[in-house]
Image (tube, rainbow, N blue to C red):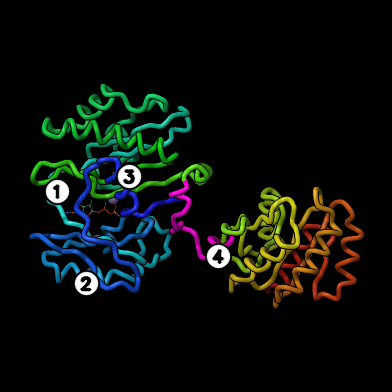
Amino acid sequence: MKLLEYEGKEIFGRYKIPIQKLCGVIKLGDSPDKLRLEGPGPWVVKAQVLAGGRGKAGGVKLAKTPAEARELAGKMLGMKMATHQTQGKALTVGEVLVEEACEITREIYISVVMDRKESCPAIIASAEGGMSIEELAHSHPEKIIKVPVDVEAGLLDYEARQLAFDLKIPQNNFRDFTRLARQMVKIFIDLDANLVEINPLVITGDGRLVAIDSKIVTDDNALFRHKDLAAKTDHEASGIEREAKAIGINYIGLDGDIGCMVNGAGLAMATLDTVKLAGGDAANFLDVGGGASVEQITDAFQIILRDPKVKTVLVNIFGGIMKCDNIASGVVEASRKVKIGVPLIVRLEGTNVKEGKAILARSGMKLEQADSLWEAAQKAVKAAK
Ligand code: GDP
Ligand code: MN
């Protein structure tokens, strides 16, 4: 799960990583009057979207007066924004962060990532921050410093000091920097994160070290031991994806128009491939789970049909643990509870498949059966067109 900048900075604050003074976060529907804009300014107004490159896309603005800060925040809220990291799509700015701005004399890049090759966390840092680290890695790989970290011991003092020397951190900021680097590693480990990034970490006009951006990505597989993180809204997930998650269905929305209901992740992926091969595009990846009970099938139909793009539903279920006749009864019963207003293609295979098909045939339901996945995919593509 990716955290928004202000969510990451809340965590930074708890770990004593220096951040700018918060003036408030406003959400869609909030008035910018809510912002606490005291002091001399200036202020920085920042779009809270899950993408970097906001600076260049108009998502980071400086304001000299409280009135200007309120005006900029109000305008930014609800704005559509595409950055070089949003793959051509525009994101709606649902929240805006306002903080006291700082004067910047130097920008540094620092992050903690999982080094899969070395099987340990690693600090990635560069004395040249602010710009895209991917670009720098490409054009000047020698400017990137990598420090492997022992997951048990964390970043050791001498390692942090060596990093500070390598980054040419000024003497005045040395202790703050070594503490910050060690705290970043601590956050990475405590949160089961995949990434903890500060880009840029700056040295201000008055000589302080401040994290002016944050990017934290946590590992969903470890969410069960982070109740506070699990309770947070996953800003990257669509509304349908969040609903599916809440009822225990594995669902990922896609761009096509064929809704797929499948049991098992492997079969679901094979279904997507086969639909593609048949000339169509799936509207989703959906794994109802191994059991595929009536409740699960009903829930799954409801979730699939919530997507207005869906023009046909393809059910591809393998009766292994659950027998095909039970699944067929489940589909029939679910179809009584959920109005399926689009063509339905069903392919059953496995134990008691004959009985299952007979149940579907007798049900009087409007559906087409298929004997193979290939046939089912072709029928679904045809129905969607
Ligand atoms: P990103 O572009 O999405 O990564 O957003 P950042 O939070 O990193 O901000 C982008 C750039 O805006 C930074 O690299 C800074 O140059 C500038 N910026 C952000 N906050 C401040 C601030 O408080 N003062 C000044 N002077 N510049 C800022
Ligand atoms: Mn940044």
Identified by mark 3, the residue type is Glu
Q: CA distance from mark 1 to mark 2?
A: 28 Å
Q: Secondary structure at mark 1?
A: strand
The reply to whether dot 3 and dot 4 touch (C-beta < 8 Å) is no
Q: CA distance from mark 3 to mark 1?
A: 22 Å
Residue shown at 34% from the left, 74% from the top:
29
Q: Is the CB–ligand 1 distance for label 1 below 8 Å?
A: yes
| Badge 3 or badge 2: first in the primary sequence | 2
Image quarter of residue 50: bottom left
Q: Secondary structure at mark 2?
A: helix
Q: Closest to the observer: 84 or 299?
A: 299
Whether the magenta-drawn stretch holds residue 25 is answered as no
User: Is 77 situated above or below 155?
Assistant: below
Q: Which residue is mark 3?
A: 135
Q: Which residue is mark 1?
A: 104
Discs 1/4, front: 4
Magenta range:
227-244
| Badge 3 or badge 4: first in the primary sequence | 3
Q: Quadrant of the C terminus?
A: bottom right
| Badge 2 or badge 4: first in the primary sequence | 2
